[in-house]
């Protein structure tokens, strides 16, 4: 087996492996995208490594992002691992372990002090693999999906802009796993901040058109006609929820956002939150589907032993 950097010519083989490697139990899903590297390319410093046999047949891959992440108030270099895939015909040969070890060596050479990933809780083989490699399950995340809906008339006005300056002045910027300038990196994917600011209080939600990059699609839906699949892949990712202390104002922003999603023919919206985060009840009751993920972490430096605060900041480009 040979491990080498990804090339664009690998796309068709990697997408075939993606579709043969669904996650989830009762409702397995895959990441639908035009090019396999689309998820990785949301970040500035990324790499994908593939593993192939001696005949040049691709057997698996792993995605790696190196970024500055806030932990205990200090910015440190961490690696984010994702898109670990091994073709079913090559499993139980240690290829997943080999890919993770290779990724860790790459990150250590680049100066990373730790590595982390997010694994859906029902993906027991992946959890077992990372457990065996010394990764700790440090926190659960909730992946919530919503349907677009027409908003009831509201006395609270909601506006939108493309400015994320407000984010750095909120408690979000004090959390562990905080990554700066996420919104700025999404400016080319129709980033919008939806907000209300008055005597009633301040609340805002940010979105980007996730369907321009990737979307979780039920495995069975891959058999739909292309035009139907493209429509069902239209999705907004919600992030940077600010205003939990003014739930009525935040819900007005949320309702307006869903109304606009309906008017613009989006099929769904998604939001990922720390399971320990304190948010208004409607955030959870309005969701039509949810999944749980484990954040798994491993220190790559003997002197790096973080003590995690609560809640985590969730990078909208992940999961």
Image (spheres, grey):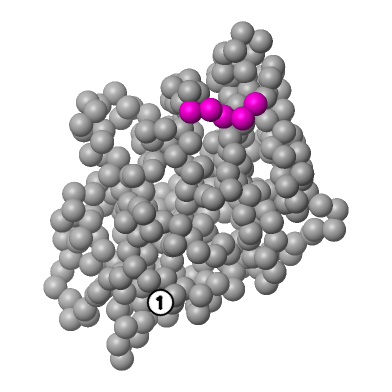
Q: Is residue 96 above or below residue 273?
A: above
Q: Quadrant of residue 131 in the image? A: top right
Query: Which contiguous range is marked in magenta?
Result: 4-8
Indicate the position of residue 36 as horizontal and vertical percent values.
46, 32
Where's the N terminus, which quadrant? top right
In the image as oriented, which residue stretches furthest toward the top?
Answer: 55
Q: Is residue 14 visible?
A: no
Foreground pick, 124 / 239: 239
Q: How many numbered marks have been drawn onto this rendered protein structure? A: 1
Query: Whole-percent x and y of residue 225?
Result: 22, 26
13, 136: nearer the viewer: 13
Q: Report the front residue among 25 and 240.
A: 240
Give the residue at x 50% y 23%: 10
Q: Does 315 lie within the magenta span?
A: no
| Placement of 166 over or under 69, stated as above or below | below
Q: Residue at x 24, y 46 (%)?
A: 267
- Relative depth, front residue between 31 and 251: 31
Disc 1 crowd, CA 10 A, few/some/many (<14, 14-19, 20+)? many
| Coordinates of residue 147 in the picture (x, y in percent) | 26, 52
Taking 106 as reference, is 197 left or right? Answer: left
244 on left or right of 95: left
Q: Position of residue 206 (x, y in %)?
A: 37, 64
Residue ID at (81%, 52%): 301
Q: Is residue 66 visible?
A: yes
Which residue sits furthest right? Answer: 302
Q: Is residue 84 left or right of residue 229?
A: right
Q: Residue at x 47, y 48 (%)?
A: 42
Question: What kind of element bears circle 1?
Answer: loop
Residue placed under numbered mark 1 in the picture: 243
């Amino acid at each position: 087996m040979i491990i080498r950097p990804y090339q664009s010519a690998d796309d068709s083989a990697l997408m075939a492996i993606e579709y043969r490697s669904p996650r989830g139990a009762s409702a397995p899903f895959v990441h639908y995208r035009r090019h396999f590297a689309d998820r990785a390319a949301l970040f500035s410093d990324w790499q994908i490594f593939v593993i192939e046999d001696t005949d040049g047949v691709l057997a698996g891959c792993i995605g790696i992002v190196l970024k500055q992440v806030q932990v205990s108030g200090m910015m440190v270099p961490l690696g984010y691992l994702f898109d670990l895939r091994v073709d079913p015909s090559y499993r139980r040969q240690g290829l997943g372990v080999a890919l993770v070890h290779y990724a860790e060596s790459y990150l250590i050479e680049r100066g990373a002090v730790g590595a982390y990933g997010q694994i859906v809780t029902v993906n027991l083989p992946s959890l077992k693999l990372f457990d065996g490699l010394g990764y700790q399950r440090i926190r659960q995340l909730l992946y919530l999906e919503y349907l677009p809906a027409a908003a009831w008339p509201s006395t609270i006005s909601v506006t939108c802009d493309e400015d994320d300056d407000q984010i750095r002045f909120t408690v979000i910027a004090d959390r562990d796993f905080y990554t700066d300038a996420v919104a700025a990196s999404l400016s080319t994917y129709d980033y919008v901040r939806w907000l209300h600011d008055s005597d009633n209080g301040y609340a805002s939600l940010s979105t980007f058109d996730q369907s321009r990059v990737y979307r979780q699609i039920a495995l069975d839906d891959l058999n739909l006609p292309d035009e139907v699949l493209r429509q069902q892949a239209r999705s907004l990712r919600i992030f940077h929820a600010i205003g939990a202390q003014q739930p009525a104002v935040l819900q007005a922003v949320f309702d307006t956002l869903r109304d606009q999603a309906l008017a613009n023919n989006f099929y769904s919206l998604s939001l990922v939150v720390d399971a320990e985060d304190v948010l208004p009840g409607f955030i959870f009751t309005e969701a039509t589907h949810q999944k749980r993920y484990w954040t798994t972490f491993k220190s790559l430096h003997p002197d790096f032993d973080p003590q995690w605060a609560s809640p985590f900041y969730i990078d909208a480009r992940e999961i």
